[in-house]
Image (cartoon, rainbow, N blue to C red):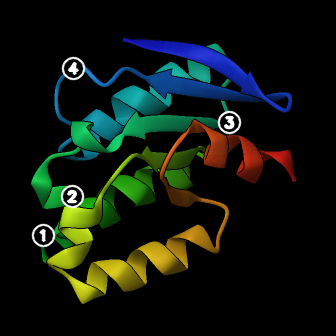
Amino acid sequence: MTHLERFHDVPVLVCAAEGAAIGGERDALDLIGDAGYQGARWVVVPAERFADDFFQLRTRVAGHVVQKFAQYGVGLVVLGDISRHLEASSALEDFVRESNGGRQLWFLRDREQLAERLRG
């Protein structure tokens, strides 16, 4: 289940916490299609919706998912607590830090942080 919201006039497709796991490119394409249909520039997915493989960089799932979003010009936000994944991987910590410095993929704690990022 998804719905469109606006944060500072930026259209954002927000996914519900309940639902199938996001585990690969096909899932990414489904979200991108929904975003395009609704006119969203960003897709927000709760962290718990991602399969654990997404957070294990050696699997390359995150890379494939993010690449699809980049190809279609849609930003992706992983929203929520990913601390257990960060504790298990310094490489993931680096990936998150680097991603949060860009304009394609953000790992954010909550909706307030998202609103702040989209403000500017």
Amino acid type shown at disc 1: Thr
Mark 3 vs mark 4: in front: 4
Q: Pinpoint residue 99: horizontal percent, then vertical percent.
A: 52, 71
Q: Amino acid at mark 2?
A: Phe
SS category of the residue bearing label 3? loop
Q: State which quadrant residue 49 falls in.
A: top left
Vertical relation: 16 (above or below) 31: above
Residue 21 falls left or right of residue 82: left
Circle 1 is placed at which residue position? 59
Q: Residue at x 66, y 19 (%)?
A: 5
Label 4: how many Cα within 10 Å (few below 14, some 14–19, many 20+):
few
**What is the three-letter code of the residue carrying label 3?**
Arg
What residue is drawn where x is 74% and y is 23%? 6
Q: Say which residue appears at 75% left-offset and 48% top-offset.
A: 116
Secondary structure found at label 4: loop
- Pinpoint residue 23: horizontal percent, then vertical percent: 17, 44
The amino acid on which the numbered mark 4 sits, given as a three-letter code, is Gly
In the rendered structure, find residue 19 and report the number of the disc placed on it. 4
Please give the name of the residue rendered at 85% of the width and 28% of the height, measured from the top-left corner. Answer: 9
In space, the residues marked 2 and 3 are separated at their CA atoms by 22 Å
Q: Are marks 1 and 2 in contact (CB under 8 Å)?
A: yes
User: Separation of disc 2 and disc 4 at Cα?
Assistant: 16 Å
Q: Quadrant of residue 57?
A: bottom left
* Residue designated by label 2: 54
Relative to 29, say whether 5 is above or below. above
Q: Residues within 10 Å of mark 2 (few under 14, many from 20)?
A: many
